[in-house]
Image (tube, rainbow, N blue to C red):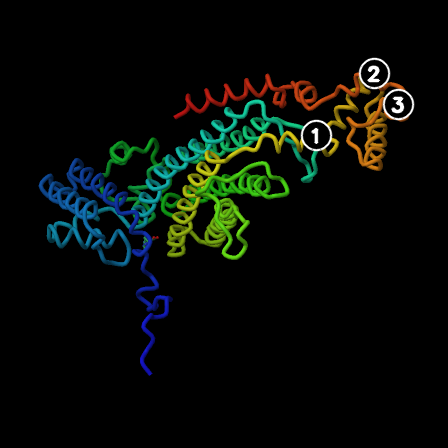
């Protein structure tokens, strides 16, 4: 028997390899080098190492940065911190050992992670804006398109498509704010906390904060090395955004079904079935919906990791990274794909319009009509409910009933009751935040201003 050509996909584990984080924390190499450069400069300014030594260290780190920028990833070690230090020692010799003076991997990893989160928040905000732009663009192209609005997935009242799309714009606006708010708490320098208790050298943490672009420095060394609440907040904001993306995906999935037939997906976002030739599956939207669960999992997973940890650093904290990286990658990919999905969506206006004509969508409007004639709303609601039941029994829409039939349910119905239309129902909803065309036009303009004005 010859052994199988393809080895089992599961990697072998050893007691040493079990501890390694380099396979995933290698993506922090830029942050790690930036932190070390600032630390070396600070050590020299404070006379803790000589200018000459710091210069060598900074040059060595710059050379490593260049290697990684232009070459393959060539570092080895337990984690990115050890790996870069080992490479530095290969390059500049013994003086590399001075870099870690007064520093611990505990404040180092906290720093790297905060730098990463700050940067990624910026990317997430940019990607959210990209999706908002796509939604707004689609809304602006369909300012007068109406479709049924739903509650309980039952046709409820007519709304403008632009109003429906702007609902997602609002959700995403809050997501952007949540990330901005989380940024305030990520933007705190932990470096200079030492392993947990502080540092016995005359370090200058304000200088470090300036060099590394932090607006605050941490005030408790034990907190600084042991909490990851800023990662939890990032995951929570990501989870919320994913929930919004998932709902948008679900609307698009429903709308693209034959049953709704409201939209057609762009060619890149629909796939054929391998067996049923008529199908155009909304795979991309389904994957966005599916991936939401995975980001929720990372949030709950990290909370569970943190909850039983005694102060301060424990190796458990190494589990923060894969959750964070995967959540960030998933969120950014889903935002980008959702933007493409929306931007290439073909709206079938007539199908939407046709749907507004059925389903007794104007029943509320008719009740409001009776209220206008002095009938208390509860009573009006009952009258129209009976009228609708009657129409259903006749297999007719409300517009197809005669005035005489209307009057069987209330003497208050006049000829104008039969003039009620989707357009009049939309126009009537001009309360702040309502779907009346003039309100939606103003909301579109306001959304455009917000998008252009921010960041
Ligand atoms: N690889 C570690 C992590 O990701 C770095 C910090 C290790 N510190 C320590 N004292 N073992 O959390």
Residue 373 bears which disc, if any?
Answer: 2
Residue at 49 percent across and 56 percent down: it is: 274
Quarter of the image for residue 51 reads top left
Q: Quadrant of the C terminus?
A: top left
Residue tagged by mark 1?
357
Residue tagged by mark 3?
404
In-front residue for pair 411/102: 411
Along the polypeptide, which appears first: circle 2 or circle 3? 2
Crowd class of label 1 (few under 14; some 14 to 19; many from 20; radius 10 Å): some
Crowd class of label 2 (few under 14; some 14 to 19; many from 20; radius 10 Å): few
Q: x and y percent of residue 52 in the render?
A: 9, 41
Along the polypeptide, which appears first: circle 3 or circle 1? 1
Q: Is 232 on the left or on the right of 426, as rendered?
A: left
In-front residue for pair 25/144: 144
Quarter of the image for residue 411 reads top right
Instruction: Single out the residue that lies furthest toward the front.
Output: 277
In-front residue for pair 196/169: 169
Under circle 1, the secondary element is: helix
């Amino acid at each position: 028997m010859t052994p199988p050509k393809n080895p089992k996909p599961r990697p072998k584990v050893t007691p040493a390899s079990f501890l390694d984080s380099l396979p995933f924390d290698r993506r922090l190499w830029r942050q790690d080098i930036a932190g070390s450069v600032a630390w070396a400069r600070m050590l020299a300014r404070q006379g803790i190492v000589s200018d000459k030594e710091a210069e060598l260290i900074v040059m060595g780190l710059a050379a490593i940065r260049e290697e990684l920028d232009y070459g393959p990833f060539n570092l080895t070690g337990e984690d990115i911190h050890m790996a870069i230090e080992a490479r530095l020692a290969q390059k500049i010799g013994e003086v590399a050992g001075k870099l870690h003076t007064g520093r611990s991997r505990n404040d180092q990893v906290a720093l790297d992670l905060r730098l990463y989160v700050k940067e990624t928040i910026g990317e997430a905000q940019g990607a959210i804006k990209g999706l908002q732009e796509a939604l707004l663009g689609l809304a602006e192209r369909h300012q007068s398109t109406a479709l049924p609005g739903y509650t309980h997935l039952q046709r409820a009242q007519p709304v403008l498509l632009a109003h429906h799309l702007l609902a997602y714009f609002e959700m995403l606006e809050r997501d952007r704010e949540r990330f901005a708010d989380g940024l305030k708490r990520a933007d705190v320098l932990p470096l200079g906390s030492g392993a947990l208790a502080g540092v016995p050298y005359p370090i200058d943490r304000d200088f470090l904060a300036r060099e590394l672009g932090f607006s605050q420095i941490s005030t408790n060394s034990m907190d600084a090395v042991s909490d990851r609440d800023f990662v939890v907040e990032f995951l929570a904001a990501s989870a919320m955004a994913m929930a919004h993306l998932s709902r948008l995906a679900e609307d698009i999935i429903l709308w693209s079904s034959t049953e709704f037939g409201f939209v057609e997906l762009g060619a890149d976002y629909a796939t054929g079935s391998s067996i049923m030739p008529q199908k155009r599956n909304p795979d991309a939207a389904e994957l966005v919906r599916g991936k939401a669960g995975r980001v929720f999992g990372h949030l709950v997973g990290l909370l569970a990791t943190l909850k039983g940890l005694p102060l301060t650093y424990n190796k458990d904290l190494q589990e923060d990274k894969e959750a964070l990286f995967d959540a960030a990658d998933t969120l950014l990919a889903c935002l980008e794909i959702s933007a493409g999905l929306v931007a290439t969506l073909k709206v079938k206006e007539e199908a939407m319009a046709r749907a507004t004509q059925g389903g007794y969508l104007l029943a509320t409007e008719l009740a409001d009509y009776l209220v206008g004639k002095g009938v208390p709303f509860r009573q009006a609601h009952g009258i129209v409910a009976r009228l609708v039941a009657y129409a259903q029994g006749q297999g007719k829409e409300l517009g197809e009933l005669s005035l005489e039939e209307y009057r069987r349910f209330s003497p208050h119905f006049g000829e104008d009751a039969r003039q009620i239309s989707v357009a009049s129902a939309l126009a009537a909803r001009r309360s702040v935040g309502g779907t009346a065309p003039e309100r939606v036009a103003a909301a579109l303009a306001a959304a455009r201003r917000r998008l252009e004005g921010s960041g």
